[in-house]
Amino acid sequence: MNVENLQYSLSTSLMQFIYSMLVIIAVSYFLYLKRGGKPEFFLVYMLVGAVVFQFCHLLKFMPISIGFAFGLFALFSMMRFRSRTIDVRDLTYLFFTIGIAALDGLITEEPFYHILIWDLLIVGMLLTGEMVSGSYRKTSMLVTYEKTELLQEGKYEMLIEDLQNRLSLKNITKVKVGDVNFKKNTAELKVFFKNDRKSENKS
């Protein structure tokens, strides 16, 4: 390989690396971190993406079988974070990071628009999954409530507003009334709200 070919190969690989990292950073920030992801995982995704891309890039110039390469990736994936439990969403973005970095790092002779199309398809599927799962991501809590006068018909909006102010929740979707204690003038309420992952991560 002469100097011109070496410089061309190096510049092409560098451009592929920058592009791949921009995709990973953009998805990790706007889809993961901005939607309640853990800040420490944002750094993990960047570093894992960079290492996997370089590893796959080196594999292109080594006489190594596909099966052995996938075995190395399987070993690499099993080694990660074995000491702690990983949330399914965190693991999904880790898999996305490894997949994008491996795909972009292993492609050699394909035109750039082929890489762009495949990456856009994967990002589009991830975005669709986030939108669908986010609409179903709800949880609930039991509350002992003393303002029983707000349980009367026609005061549901006032009840929601009062609960949101007291519980510091802005996304209450439904309230179910349970047992009512007339002696203590209290009621057991089951409050349903969309899961705010940011508040979970801060706690």
Image (cartoon, rainbow, N blue to C red):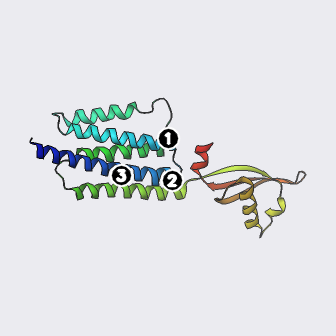
Number of the front mark, 3 or 2: 3
Q: Earlier in the sequence, mark 1 or mark 3?
A: 3
Q: Which residue is drawn at the image coordinates 38% and 49% (left, top)?
A: 24
Instruction: Give the side of residue 89 with respect to residue 17, left or right.
Output: right
User: Distance between the Cα atoms at labels 3 and 2?
Assistant: 16 Å
Using the image, tell me which numbered label, if any, was put on residue 22.
Answer: 3
Q: Residue furthest front?
A: 3
Quarter containing the N terminus: top left
Q: Which residue is drawn at the image coordinates 37% and 35% (left, top)?
A: 77
User: Which amino acid does the dot numbered 2 rest on?
Assistant: Lys
Residue 62: x and y in percent read 17, 34
Badge 3: how crowded within 10 Å, few (<14), some, or many (20+)? Answer: few
Residue 17: x and y in percent read 29, 47
Q: From the image, tell me which residue sits under label 2.
A: 34
User: Distance between the Cα atoms at labels 2 and 1?
Assistant: 13 Å
Instruction: Give the side of residue 129 with respect to residue 196, left or right.
Output: left
Badge 2: how crowded within 10 Å, few (<14), some, or many (20+)? Answer: few
Determine whether the residue tagged by mark 1 lies in a helix, strand or loop.
helix
Residue 183: x and y in percent read 90, 51
Using the image, tell me which numbered label, if any, was put on residue 175.
Answer: none
Determine whether the residue tagged by mark 2 lies in a helix, strand or loop.
loop
User: Which amino acid does the dot numbered 1 rest on?
Assistant: Glu
User: Distance between the Cα atoms at labels 1 and 3?
Assistant: 18 Å
In the depicted view, which residue is nearer to us: 69 or 183? 69
